[in-house]
Image (cartoon, grey):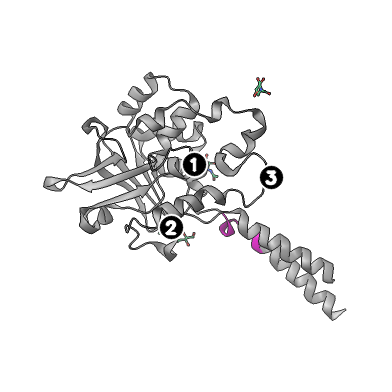
Amino acid sequence: MPRAGIVRICLLLLVALTTWPGACRATHNITAILAGHRDLAEFSRQLTATGLADDIDGRNTITVLAVDDAHMATLKARGLPRETLRHVLSLHVLVDYYDDDKLHRLPGGSAVVSTLFQASGDAPGSEGMVKIAVRRGGRVAFVPQDVDDARATVFYVKSVHEAPYNISVLQVSSVITSPAAEAPSATESKPNATDATSRHGPHAGAYTAPSPAGQGSSSDINAAKQAGDGGDRGKKNGASGGGAPCGLPFALAFLMAAILVVNW
Ligand SMILES: *[C@@H]1O[C@H](CO)[C@@H](O)[C@H](O)[C@H]1NC(C)=O
Ligand SMILES: *[C@@H]1O[C@H](CO)[C@@H](O)[C@H](O)[C@H]1NC(C)=O
Ligand SMILES: *[C@@H]1O[C@H](CO)[C@@H](O)[C@H](O)[C@H]1NC(C)=O
């Protein structure tokens, strides 16, 4: 009887731990953060419409480069398909924390940062990376990696929200885009069978069963690519993927619970 009591308590603790929101989700809500900024309303709407808002809220150590309504209107007028729009907007989500202070203290005056476009696995090579560079006069520029076009450069305008080292929202002068982000989407022509997994890891393989931990695959690639960029100073706990896969603690907890039940 005492042994059963201990097992019961362990199980209760496990249930409490795994259902506690903090165990998985980050504490921020990008929609709520942007709600206080009326000129960023369209950007916020499109983050929600493309599903990126959920991705942002599910990650820690993240920087969102917000664009005002006037520039979003130009993007909207182009009538890009939803998946392409998602790629373009995911270039605006850096999977690292950069606030005003950090932008002006970049080692060597520049840094190459991975974005959610890179993390999605849809970006060819390193074309989902964004280079941050301090220009003459102190202006901070953002330009997609491998894009050699001055028109692709956008500039830092102001800091909108800072919660170190969880989430930072910085306003930039215009929409960041690249030929890779606007390329016809592979996921749109894929058979329906892979739809469920394509959002978080289209390169995970067609025969990989969807698992709670599957979300981690793309950020692992991303972490490996990011390892050499040297721009990770001041990063919380050195979490380079910008948020551990949510499914992992659940999978572990499930395993432990299963072992407990078997031993009971
Ligand atoms: C985030 O905030 C918005 C606006 O305040 C709200 O409608 C939405 O339900 C919130 N999302 C979550 C996941 O709490
Ligand atoms: C960052 O997130 C953690 C939980 O994930 C929270 O405890 C902490 O207060 C947050 N920091 C800020 C500045 O919001
Ligand atoms: C895929 O799903 C769409 C609806 O979501 C359907 O119209 C289409 O026929 C499906 N294609 C295949 C190959 O099953």
Q: Which residue is mark 1?
A: 121
Q: CA distance from mark 1 to mark 2?
A: 16 Å
Looking at the image, is mark 2 or mark 3 nearer the viewer? 3
Q: Say whether mark 3 is within 8 Å of ligand 3.
A: no
Residue 57 part of the magenta segment: no
**To which residue does mark 3 refer?**
209
Q: Which of marks 1 and 3 precedes in the sequence?
A: 1
Instruction: Give the class, few, some or many, for how many residues have Cα within 10 Å of label 1's Cα (few <14, many ≥20).
Output: many
Q: Residues within 10 Å of mark 2 (few under 14, many from 20)?
A: many
Which residue occupies 61% across, 41% down? Answer: 205
**Residue at 62% of width from left, 33% of height from top?**
195
Q: Which of the pair 117/169 is nearer the observer?
A: 117
Looking at the image, is mark 1 or mark 2 nearer the viewer? 1
Task: Point out the stretch of residues depicted in magenta.
Answer: 17-24
Which amino acid does the dot numbered 1 rest on? Gly
Can residue 78 be seen here? Answer: yes
Horizontal arrangement in the rendering, residue 163 relative to residue 53 (left or right): left
- N-term-proximal mark, 1 vs 2: 1
> What percent of the width, then of the height, locates residue 229?
33, 55
Identify residue for label 2.
240
Question: Between 192 and 75, which is closer to the camera in this rendering?
Answer: 192
Q: Secondary structure at mark 2?
A: loop
Mark 2 / mark 3, whichever is N-terminal: 3
Q: Nearer the viewer, residue 247 or 209?
A: 209
